[in-house]
Amino acid sequence: MIRVENLTFSYPDGPEVLSDINLDFDMRSTAIIGQNGAGKTTFAKLLKGLLKPFIGDIYIGDTNVRDTSAAMLAGKIGLVFQNPNDQIFKSRVLDEVMFGPLNIKLDKQTARKKAIEALKITGLADKLEVNPHDLSLSEKKLLCMASVLAMDTDIFILDEPTIAQDHTGKETIRKIIQSLKERNKLVMTIIHDMDFAAENFERIIVFNGGKAILDGDASFVFGQKDILQQARVEAPAAARLAEELGLAGTFLTEEELIKDLRQCGERAQL
Amino acid sequence: MTKIIADNLKYKYPLSDKLALDNISFKVEKGEFIGIIGANKAGKSTLCQALTGLVPHFYKGAYGGKVFVDGLEVKEHSIAEISLKAGIVFQNPFTQMTGSKMTVYEEIAFGLENLGIAREEMQKQIDHAMELMDIASLKERNPFDLSGGQMQRLAIASIIAMNPEIIVLDEPTSQLDPEGSEEVFLAVQLLSRQGVTVIMAEHKMEKVAKYCDRILLLYNGEIIDFDTPGKIFSRDDLKQYGVVPPIFTSVCRELGVKKSGTDEYPVTLEEARAALGRKVK
């Protein structure tokens, strides 16, 4: 779905932010993790066509991002920005979400329908007339997600979706990701919340110093203690507790760990 | 020494028909590190603003009860007067930047310049704040060229430099990676050990459990509980307030494993290892 070949990038007069990245993205939901400054957000902007590769190529399907514009890619790939204030610019929630669909030439009625559907999914259906800047940070993040959902693109990139979300907000996002996966969309995220990444994404890619240094299924990646340490990435809480307890294998979720500990307990006839 | 007293605080935003804070009463002692937790809309940010005078002076609205910050009654003193006692770090660091300063160093100096502090003293305080937040290497950078995490550390440094008795932080680690979050918690804990009173609203329960001395649990503008992390996260009814305890606690609760000699479940990795380790062998 996305092919990245020999991608190198730097901002004008700056050091290399990404260096020689080669990655293929299939339909597996994918989380990109790594420290602040590892190049993750720059990578997402390159995929979305907001930045152009310095060296190398990015193909979205058969389209080389270099040969097209961000506007042309808007119907294929959606990006929810980390900072909602970078994305929001209308003065009414409904207008904000309708903007994208209208921009890809959908008629007003269809755009409105898609916008309202997306706002329902994100739990903001009662805020249609509100000024987006009066929303809380967590609501703004959900609004930005609604704007991208309304575009119904094949690829969704969520930059730090769980920022400022409480348990209910995270549950909403979890369900949205699940439903996108069921509808055969490629869902990608850039995320610091390792518990959320481990529970919701099949593939994990670790960025460090502008390179993709580790790539694989979540249970494989979170088992690579030394490389994670090098990238200064913390494993999910369940994996860390399992390691402290000396359990064999990698545990991604609370449920997996409880099941194993119960079996341990039964073996010890507790 | 008591640094913060809230006595039956009630507050309603203008144009709202619902109390954002209702019957809030609590006391905080000098050097305590207090976590405020609760679902979104529980009143965490509003309480942070009430402790620094933004509520009611900036936001207006209906206000009842009393809040004392280091002896000053908030309602009777200006934001400027209260800011000498209590500094606030906002959730979104963009909100905190002056927008008029070209470097990190100048941004931190801004608050001190406004207080008319002597140049030498100012430099000392800025250096101390930058060192504590590990941003000395960024001092010549433009604040708006920083990453979200770096900018948040700058926002915190700007407040630390003012040497307040009390620091109030509203979800300060939301933009940070796990290592950056840990650094902020460690730095803030160090401040509290040095006698600064810290109030921090947070969603990262693992960190709150590890670092805070006591936790204030809010729901619908009311205090549900104010106690140690062990007591708060051992409550059976946490989920009904939209709060999920650290995974370490959930695992131990599910297996019925409590901290040795107590009626509390473990809340940190270390406590969980100690309690479960006895069973796993």
Image (cartoon, rainbow, N blue to C red):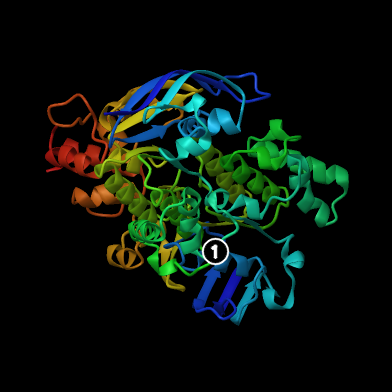
**x 20%, y 24%: residue:** B263
Amino acid found under the numbered disc labelled 1? Thr
Task: Check disc 1: other Cα within 10 Å, few if <14, some if 14-19, many if 20+.
Answer: some
Where, by quadrant of the figure, is residue B131 drawn? bottom left
Query: Taking B47 as reference, is B174 above or below it?
Result: below
Q: Residue furthest bottom?
A: A55
Q: Position of residue B79 (x, y in %)?
A: 52, 36
Disc 1 sits on a residue from what chain? Answer: A
- Residue B269 horizontal/vertical position (percent): 24, 44
Q: Residue B115, position in %: x, y?
A: 47, 48
Which residue is located at x 46 percent, y 35 percent? B82
According to the picture, the residue beneath numbered tag 1 turns out to be A41
Residue A186 in which image quadrant: bottom right
Percent position of residue B266, x then y: 23, 35
Determine whether A65 is above or below A28 in the image: below
Q: Quadrant of residue B2?
A: top left
SS type, badge 1: helix
Task: State the residue in front, B190 or B219.
Answer: B190
For the residue pair A80 and A213, the one nearer the viewer reads as: A80
Q: Look at 72% across and 67% down and name the residue there.
A: A70
Question: B215 or A169: which is nearer to us?
Answer: B215
